[in-house]
Image (spheres, helix red, strand yellow):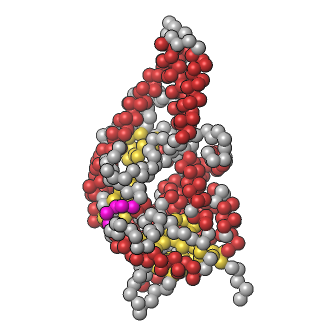
Amino acid sequence: MNREPTLTYVYAVAVPTPELVRTVASLRGVADAALSLLPPLDDSRPAAPAFVTSQVPHGDWREEALRARFEDLGWLESTARAHHHVIQALSERATVLPLRMATLYEDEERALAALREQRPAFADRLALLAHHAEYGVKVYVRPDAGDGDGDGPDAAPPAATPAPGSPGKAYLQARKRQHHAREDRYQQAARAAERIAAAAAPHATHAVRHPTQSGPLTHGEAGPDGENVLNDAYLVPDDRAGAFRRAVQQAGEDLPGVRVDITGPWAPYSFAMPAPRTTGTDPDPDPGTGTGTGTETPGGPT
Amino acid sequence: MSDPLANRLGPLPSRATPMSYPPSSSSASLADILERVLDKGIVIAGDIRINLLDIELLTIKLRILIASVDKAKEMGIDWWEYDPSLSSRHSGSPLAEENRRLRAEVEALRRERLGTAEPGVQGAEYEADDRAREEDRPSRRAPKRNRPAP
């Protein structure tokens, strides 16, 4: 009976049903661990939100070990995918609240205590999210769109036809022209993004604007010359999903140099609750009015 | 054209292939997945503290790096190389770099036209000032909006 000590890893919150129990039993979590519901489904009691959990080896997941492992990109990828896979599979069959990756408790008792504290809030949020899914809308713009000759702004400025003045001056003037052209295109891109966001909004109950994705490694997704200028998430009722997609796609048509990607359906990652509320003193107990942090209406403040 | 989840996700993976992910997960970009599992979702205080402060730090790194891990490996990217908290002068994104350079050049041009003396010295001053401001706001085009509704 000398089993390796474990920690309790929590993936999501959901209300147990027989179907959910079957789904949970069929899945594997991070570190290939078997999943279980905490507490288990109990037919004798009214259904209440429960944690979907697994046990993970203490040695690999304790605080110091985790710090080091988070810097291992390969480990991070496989863990993030495993965490996401569980949540996504659950979200097909039930309304779930995704938890931040690597939420860990010393044992099931400690996890249960945390669950009990938050249960009413979890139940409220689950009710709000039922029959909804999250969709991502990402707009990419090609910085050289409209140039016509494919001479992108990142290309070297034209070296030919030197101005009568100094070569340096000619160079800087060319750079300045490029700079202005680019600014114009960004303004166009911003208008396109707002147009797309405005088309999406009527079909969604909530919207969140995430920071655009940028960096040396986004080029794979953005395309060789694309830049992400909009990265929104929308909470869309299931029966509006088709209309939502059509509206967004239509809004993105006929915009030169603009590409629109719709991602999802996702589990409602972006619409899960912010940090837990302090008990009893919240002046606005209504979870349905989008008072969560980061929630906003697209096309609102710019 | 509705796109039901069930069709996208395919059958549940069997226990025999626990590490093979259904199409939806693998077609979702890693950048999107990392963004969501590390930056979204409920944060509740766990016993292991990694899920609060450290993930905040991590998401800063992700902001800079977020994309295909395969590509990262391919390019031999050092995760920490782009960490603004660890590197005294982080390189920033190529675009920010480019932007910085362009602005300095445009400013130099403007000064040249105005006939300002010693454009080199002043240009350098401008550039340093510009760089400092640039670093004050690393995510320059779409900062997180926390402004309350008016």
Instruction: Describe residue A156's horizontal placement relative to residue A267 as left or right.
Output: right
Decide which of A49, A29 is in the foreground and name it: A49
Q: Quadrant of the C terminus of chain A?
A: top left
* Residue farthest toward the bottom in the current orientation of the protein: A44
Seen at 46% across and 86% down, the residue is A41
Q: Quadrant of the N terminus of chain A?
A: bottom right
**Region of the chain picked out in magenta, as a range:** A288-292
- Tell me if residue A57 can be seen: yes
Name the image quarter holding residue A282: bottom left
Instruction: Describe residue A162's horizontal placement relative to residue A63 as left or right.
Output: left
Q: Position of residue A75 (x, y in %)?
A: 64, 61
Seen at 56% across and 56% down, the residue is B56
Decide: is B53 above or below A189: below
Q: Position of residue A10 (x, y in %)?
A: 54, 73
Decide: is B109 above or below A188: above
- Tell me if residue B10 can be seen: no
Magenta-drawn stretch, dominant element (helix, strand or loop): loop
Q: Position of residue B99 (x, y in %)?
A: 51, 32
Seen at 66% across and 44% down, the residue is B87
Seen at 60% across and 23% down, the residue is B124
Decide: is A25 above or below A177: below
Decide which of A235, B44 is in the foreground and name it: B44
